[in-house]
Amino acid sequence: PGGTIAVMSNEASKTNEPPLIAAYRGRPTPHTPVWFMRQAGRSLPEYRRIREGVPMLESCRRPELVCEITLQPVRRHGVDAAILFSDIVVPLAAAGVGVEIVAGTGPVVAEPIRTEADLARLRGQADLSFISESVRLVTAELGDVPLVGFAGAPFTLASYLIEGGPSRTHAATKALMYGQPETWHALCAWLAELTREFLQTQVSAGAAAVQLFDSWAGTLSAADYRRYVAPHSAYVLAGLADAGVPRIHFGVDTAELLPAMAEAGADVVGVDWRTPLDVAARRIGGALPVQGNLDPCVLFAPWPVIETEVRRVLTEGAAAPGHVFNLGHGVLPETDPSVLTRVVELVHEVSTQ
Ligand code: CP3
């Protein structure tokens, strides 16, 4: 088997396929590729400096700034992918929804959507030209490093629109979902259309993979997820089927949802730290690559603990047909960036042996 792997990785390098894309396709790679959700952001002093005085959503609309911030973690850490600097609420703002990102809180929606009448305020057209421009600038600078585009999934976006901000219980979201199912499905259909367009824009401009973040879907039972959410996420993912780029589907606390999230049309499933990757790989049928899943809080532990955990994640990830190393959720702002760099080196070193 060792010989086969060596021959096949030559095969992969012949086609100049980046390790990230090979792993997402379940093909052999010279090393396990690694990137971090939220690798661009407050853990980096160079990010905090360049963002000074520029509101979050404003910074997402300036292509030169987006380009620089997207590249910062690639230069510093030597990760195998860039992720576009943007936010899940960017397409909402582009479609005219009154939304701000409040530091330390997250997205805040001025006039939440709670009734059928509120739906009438949602417009059809969004100007996403600044996204195409940003992606073109970034991909021109990145060279061989692939760019991951992303969007929020309809459920997670709906939760911000309905709650008006972050929520622990998602009570208002569920009240609308159970109590006004027609309004719920109409809202999610609008979000799915917008999300499709947001992702297609990124792919047309050069993104090499896309990740759909359904960060808060884990608040639902599998039955409710399948009934109220999966069809809308499936619509988004189906819109990318012909684009030829791997589609990653990720959420937090999704142990019970993994099969349904795979069935929604994912090529790769992102897993949080609660489910070991070998268990996750089995739950989704054993045929799909996985991404994850180091607990972001492990990065605050002494190095020997981090090293043990990284090795464990790599071992468990090897049970899937492909593995892209990542955290189980985003980098926390307090994280020491030099630890992230060391993790990248360790992942490459261990997985090359
Ligand atoms: O490096 C990257 O991962 C790319 C950038 C990225 C951001 N947001 C930038 C950002 C990505 C992929 C996102 C996605 C996002 N945004 C999600 C899905 C991923 C996840 O974490 O589950 C969600 C739920 C949001 C909504 C959101 N936006 C939250 C919860 C917050 C944090 C609020 C805070 O201040 O703690 C934001 C703001 C945000 N998005 C920041 C960044 C870098 C911080 C704002 C700042 O630096 O001032």
Image: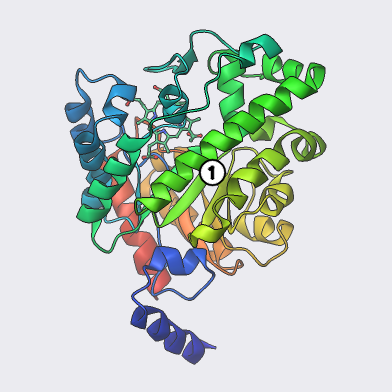
The correct choice, above or below, for 208 with respect to 2 in the image is above
Spot occupied by residue 32 in the image (x, y as percentages of width and height): 43, 66
When the figure is inspected, residue 32 is found, relative to residue 56, above or below; the finding is below
Element at badge 1? strand
Q: Position of residue 149 (x, y in %)?
A: 41, 47
Residue 264 x/y as whole percent: 68, 49
Say which of 264 and 240 sits in front. 240
Q: Position of residue 307 (x, y in %)?
A: 41, 55
Q: Amino acid at mark 1?
A: Leu
* Residue 232 appears in the rendering: yes
* Left or right position of 1 against 229: left
Image quarter where ligand 1 lies: top left
Q: Quadrant of the N terminus?
A: bottom right
Using the rendered view, name the quadrant where residue 176 is placed. top right
Taking the spot 53% from the left edge, 54% from the top edge, the residue there is: 247
Please report the residue visible at 57 percent of the width from the left and 63 percent of the height from the top. 289
Residue at mark 1 = 212
Disc 1 crowd rating (10 Å Cα; few below 14, some 14-19, many 20+) is: many
Asked whether, in this view, residue 343 is left or right of residue 48, the answer is right
Looking at the image, residue 188 lies above or below residue 346: above
Q: Nearer the viewer, residue 287 or 142?
A: 142
Q: Is residue 271 visible?
A: no
Q: Residue at x 39, y 70 (%)?
A: 31
Q: Is mark 1 within 8 Å of ligand 1?
A: no
- Residue 221 sits in quarter: top right
- Where the C terminus falls, by quadrant? bottom left
